[in-house]
Image (spheres, rainbow, N blue to C red):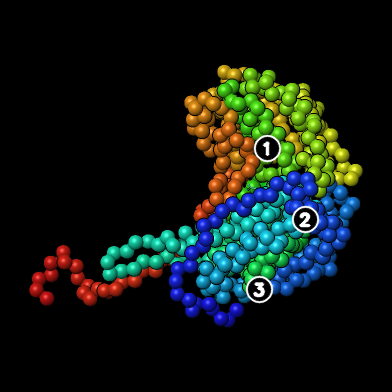
Amino acid sequence: MTQQSVSMAGNFRVPAPHNEPTRDFAPGSPESKAVQEEIARISSQVRDLPHYINGNWTTSEETQDVVSPHDHAKVLGRISLADEATTRSAIDAALAAHHDWSRTPWWDRAAVFLRAADLAAGKYRDELVATTMLGQSKTFHQAEIDAACETADFFRYNAHLAQQIYQDQPPALQGETNLIDQRPLEGFVLAVSPFNFTAIGANLPTTPALLGNTVVWKPSEKAALSNDVVMRLLEEAGLPPGVINMVHGSGRDVSDTAMSHEDFAGLSFTGSSEVFRSLWKTAAGNIDRYKAYPRLVGETGGKNAVLAHPTADAQAVKIALVRGAYEYQGQKCSATSRAYVARSIWNEIKDDLVETVKSLPVGDTTKHETYVGAVIDENALRRLEGVIEKAKGLDSHTLLAGGTVRPETGWFVDPTLFETTDPEAFTMSEEFFGPLLSVYVFEDEEWDSILELVDRASPYALTLAVFASDRVAISHALDVLRNTAGMTYINDKTTGALMGQVSFGGGRASGTNDKTGSRLALQRWISGRFVHENMTPAQDWRYPYLSMGEM
Ligand code: NAD
């Protein structure tokens, strides 16, 4: 890019964003038929899933199959696996694009992402939904709210938030002006995204890019099919070559190369706490090489709790547990995986909850009857199998539903419910990332001590839900559990954050809490320069207080 579009005068305004409405997908509806057609089209191909570097789609010799988790014999695509030279070329492309992109007026950058939002909500919508259903085993509803709606929401709301940041300028005295030049970071940003939300894949590289940074993006190999669609729609939206460079492959290999580069400026990561910690250590080990201190942003694991007070609405607790724990196979970072339920509420809901969990239809997510699909891969299934077997062997645990895995055609783990008498058990503290919920029942009068227990039971602090009618109980919980979660829901489930309404992120082992969906998240990718101008510069070095006699 050699020409800059600076020949316009006027303050560009981003339209007020709105949440993209979700479609219902009732059986036989036009949207269901359209997505089924996309599913048939995509299923009949084995897609090449190349890297996208400096505006070119390039392949590597080494490839890895992408299969459908609920039908693992079905190969949907082949990702190219980056070697060191591939990652280096992505870094070079990002650095070469930095000069022009960082000087592109912010409204031109925003316009690219606003166009991308309309492509996600329009032309590419069904393809995003279908690839997410097939490649990540999401149902119609789960794929729609993620791949179509949240992707569009991220692009629209982030453009709006960027506008607020640029508009927010400091005051000045008469005769002076002050300006904050919100510069992108010097160097390149590495974005590493997880499998479980197509929208997170779309958001992690584009937020830094919106603010003028250039990016190397390593999508999850388990979400490559849908993330390839994201990259194609960004290209169609007019993203210049080199601004976002997508490389597939091993996270460790790509990050080792990228994070040992002197121009590594920041990490935009979402995934497990373990991987984020290892990346933080890599950055620490390389700190002497870097031109600047890198920004490290990570949204990581969770062990999200539901607490039900004796005054809770019992039916609402039951629904929150079912939806929060088992939708998308419990593979949302915000999924409910531990619950603390007052005895009187448990007596009311237990039988019904157990029957409901046993009856949840598990299967192929492209079928309308499915509520729970397959977990993402065999490793996840074997890990969950190990957890279930270990819990079954504990005297403190009673298996109430599920407890079986069925790996023959898909990686199916039946929705599993344990009741435990040990609130300190591993099932109440560790993240498993699957359709597995443990319930600890407390006596109605134990509310105060339960709050202390919930706070210390797990190292994570992502989401939390408190069900109660008693306002004193709610306020007390909010006080004691102030640092237990980055998001606390009152009488609502632990999942379902909505861009523009609930900004997402947690503390402790759950991440750096930079609140995706807020200005804070954008702020991490800029580094302000203060520019002060004096209209009447001083003409005399002396101050009035000085007594220097006649001069
Ligand atoms: P993951 O940590 O296994 O992988 C995330 C990304 O890191 C992938 O792109 C992967 O290829 C890469 N990676 C894996 N090992 C690596 C290594 N050694 N070095 C560098 N990169 C590596 O996570 P996942 O299974 O894709 O996603 C699930 C996890 O993400 C869960 O822990 C979940 O709680 C978390 N998550 C958190 C949020 C949040 O907002 N807090 C949102 C979504 C997911």
Quadrant of the rendered structure where residue 543 is?
A: bottom left
In whole angstroms, how far apart are the C-alphas of marks 2 and 1?
28 Å
Sequence-first disc among 2 and 1: 2
The residue indicated by pointer 1 is 324
Cα distance in 3D space between marks 1 and 3: 40 Å
Type of the residue with mark 3: Pro
The disc placed on residue 34 is 2
- Report the residue at 29% width, 73% height from top: 535
> Residue 51: where, in percent of width, then height?
75, 67
Residue 447 shown left or right of residue 327 in the figure: left
**Residue 74 to residue 333: above or below:** below
| Residue depicted at x 76% and y 31% | 357
Evaluate whether residue 330 shows in this view. Answer: no
| 2 vs 1, front mark | 2
Look at discs 3 and 2 and give the one toward the viewer.
2
Which quadrant holds residue 240?
A: bottom right
Check mark 1 vs ligand 1: CB closer than 8 Å? yes or no. Answer: no
Disc 2 within 8 angstroms of ligand 1 (CB)? no
How far across and down, in percent of the image, does residue 352 sit?
73, 25
Disc 1 residue type (three-letter): Gly
- The answer, for residue 184, to whether it is visible in the render is yes
Front residue of this view, candidates 45 and 242? 45
Q: Please tell me whether residue 279 is drawn above or below residue 394 in the rendered image.
A: below
The label number, if any, that marks residue 241 in the structure image:
3
**Type of amino acid at the residue the image marks with label 2:** Ala
Which residue is depicted at the point 60% across and 56% down? 154
